[in-house]
Amino acid sequence: MSSLFLITALFLHLATTVAGQTASLSKPGCQEKCGNVVVPYPFGINTNCSADISFTIICNETFNPPRPFIMVQVGFEEVVDISLATKTVTVMQSISPLNCSSDRKLQQLAQPMVTSYATFSNVYNRLVVVGCQNVVSLLPSYGECNPICGESSICNGINCCQNIIPPRQREIEFFYRNPQADTNAALSCGYVFMTDQRWLLNEYANHTNLHNLSSSISFQSDLRAPLVLEWEFEISNPKTRPGVQCDDIDLPYVLLGGENMSSTVCSCRHGYQGNPYLSCEDIDECKSSSLNDCPTATTCVNRPGSFTCQLPANDSEPRMKPVIIAVSCGLGGLVLLGGALVSSNVARKRIEANLSNLQTCDEETEPAMSIAVYDSLYTSETTSLSTTTDSSEFPFLSRS
């Protein structure tokens, strides 16, 4: 599931931000941001901008910058991120200390939002146990977390341990006990909570009071940590919507009550931008040279989801003439060069044949004639070849 989230996130980022062009992710006429948080549909600031009341965001402008809040089971929780690509919403949850108990007790961590569309994300969240000697067994059979005593600035098993959680749960159940717990149940022995594992890597070290819970002074009543929830929202007839692409997650997830659920993640296809839960708009690649690779002599023509590079009218014939002339000149040069080489070889062979005939002549009876014949042949052939021949190469023709 994490790989699907990553791929979809990449395509959605490219689809919503292209060469500085950003498509609105909220309903037309609605406020898109609250402070630094983008609020995309199906979420919306105020009820007329969201899919329904469970997706409604309240923008509290008494903060600077303003902060978005969403209704939960008790009051409101601050929203720090809403993602279309991963279908997640991240809220800042309040964390309460865990009461000590030497007996094995069944406890729950419930999904805080009032709606049923949200479930805990097992891709991002981890169950965290802070405080040594605490033994937490996650159900159903998802292992045991039991940190040892000591001090550490990272959650690596010393005073803090973490465990994966079952996928797509609305409620997490676990058994808890502390064999060294005092009989006074009012005392706190640590914390058990779910949080984004990125918080553990980047922020846990800053909470020095969690590194060694040696006394009740170390416990915070106002501790907060981010929690990532996966949300569901269906698109009616996605195949009929231009540019919209929806991918089903193949493996269904079994919820705590035995209910099966599957998830569909939608995005805008390549060449489109926008919010797939509203509409995907075609990107006009011809508006910017950075979006198309058309040569300067061509015209960019935008198409739905793509573009083409078109030659000007009647431009193909003039472009062919220089090519034909160049090819013809090249072939003519090759023909002339080949003819010269053939003529040279023929002349050389005629000289060699005549010289061979001269050798058979009787030098004593007809020396003058042999010399005359050679002079005649030599002069005529070498004149045509523009070369000279040294008579020393033919000692049998020497006049001396």
Image (cartoon, helix red, strand yellow):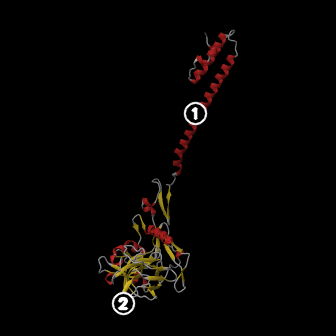
Q: Are marks 1 and 2 in contact (CB under 8 Å)?
A: no
Picture quadrant where residue 188 is located: bottom left
Q: Is residue 146 above or below residue 345?
A: below
Image quadrant where residue 349 sits:
top right
Q: Is residue 62 left or right of residue 298?
A: left
Image quadrant where one finds the C terminus: top right
Q: What count of labels does the image hold?
A: 2
Q: Is residue 188 above or below residue 336?
A: below
* Residue 321 spot, x, y in % from top left: 53, 45
Q: Is residue 320 above or below residue 87?
A: above
Q: Residue at x 39, y 73 (%)?
A: 154
Neighbor class of circle 1 (other Cα within 10 Å; few <14, some 14-19, many 20+) is few
User: Which secondary structure, mark 2?
Assistant: loop
Q: Is residue 243 visible?
A: no
Question: What amino acid type is highlighted by mark number 1?
Answer: Leu
Task: Name which quarter of the figure residue 283 lies in.
Answer: bottom left
Residue located at (56% from left, 36% from top)? 333
Q: Earlier in the sequence, mark 1 or mark 2?
A: 2
Camera-side residue of 399 and 172:
172
Q: Which residue is mark 2?
A: 186
Pick whichever, 36 or 274, lies toward us.
36
> Could you say where residue 272 lies in the image, as x and y percent from the top left?
47, 68
Q: Nearer the viewer, mark 1 or mark 2?
A: 2
Which structural element holds mark 1?
helix
Q: Which mark is residue 221?
A: none
Residue 179 at x, y = what percent?
Answer: 43, 85
**Residue linked to disc 1:** 337
Where residue 311 sits in the image (x, y, percent)? Answer: 50, 55
350 left or right, relative to 149: right
